[in-house]
Amino acid sequence: MLSEGRSGSSVLCEGIAALTRSPSHLDHGMGNLHNLAHELLGSDRKSMENQTDPISEMSQWFSSICEWYPTSGVIGFKMKPYFNISTTGQFSDPKWAASFVWMRQSNMSIVYNHRQNLLDKVISDFAFVDQGHNGTVRAPAHCRADDSACIAQRHEQRVKLPTGKWLVHILREHATLHASVLAFLEQSGLRYTTVTYEQLLPGTAGSTAAWLYWQRLLHFLRPAKAPCRAHFSNITSDDVAAALQITAQTTARHQEDRVENFADVVQTLLGTEFESQLHR
């Protein structure tokens, strides 16, 4: 899975694991290399820059995981798009260009996950970065569905966003990265599909629309010749809702509930290409 941070990818990976009978962090722990949310090649820009041989890393990892889980519905890992890539989809670092060629030659499939509402992503970014500041107790990045204290702490958390040109700049950087990733995927020859946080996660679990999106995703993940994995296509909306109850949804219904200076943010974005992303 290719996804930026704070875009719901960890919850999405757990949903996939539950619905396809694949290794999850419930079995091995969130940081364990067995689960689909494992960030094999690095969790941030610095660690990915320091990655010297991603092809060997992936090859050895897949060899081991496939041996350990020969009947798993899905085998995979999470990767963040933190590599320098132009708006035309060209890499500046040859190691990443070679890595994706190896993925294509190895017949790997990519699920590209992103958030449609970039302002919601920025709010989540700032909430995560600001945790523990001003004497507050740092909350986990994710809360289990039965952890009421963690959920309450996340719901109470509010952030102050930058405004003016700086906020517009941040949003445009995210929009540019998204466009660059799409440009690369379209010309890469890789088998891929795109999904969004809004389609699959908060406020949609159990709905017909979410169920249809999950059906499409699982159809993509199911190999053409895999009768033993027929359960991929037999899920119900209740199955989807149950799979997404593993991790609590802590996103506020309205941006104003999370942003202290929401009125200033509104004034900044009125008349820009991001005005439509404001909760009104």
Image (cartoon, grey):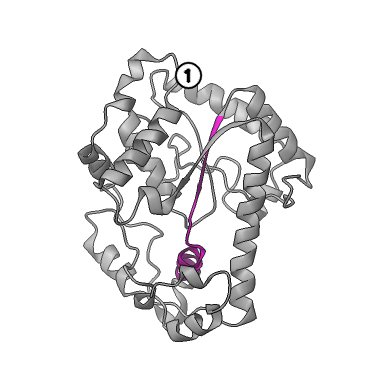
The answer to whether 131 is drawn above or below residue 235 in the figure is below
* Residue with the most extreme front position: 271
Q: Residues within 10 Å of mark 1 (few under 14, many from 20)?
A: few
SS category of the residue bearing label 1: helix
| Quarter of the image with the C terminus in it | bottom left
Q: Which residues are magenta?
A: 109-128
Horizontal relation, residue 33 to residue 88: left or right: left
Which residue appears at 50% of the width and 81% of the height?
265
The answer to whether 101 is drawn above or below residue 279 in the figure is above
Q: Nearer the viewer, residue 128 or 216?
A: 216
Residue 248: x percent and y percent? Answer: 29, 55
Which residue appears at 64% of the width and 38% of the height?
186
- Which image quadrant for residue 235? top left
Q: Is residue 251 magenta?
A: no
Residue 228: x percent and y percent? Answer: 34, 15
Residue at image mark 1: 67
- Which image quadrant for residue 138? bottom left
Horizontal relation, residue 259 to residue 243: left or right: right
Residue 221: x percent and y percent? Answer: 44, 29
Q: Is residue 24 visible?
A: no
The answer to whether 19 is drawn above or below residue 195 in the figure is above
Which residue appears at 31% of the width and 57% of the height?
249
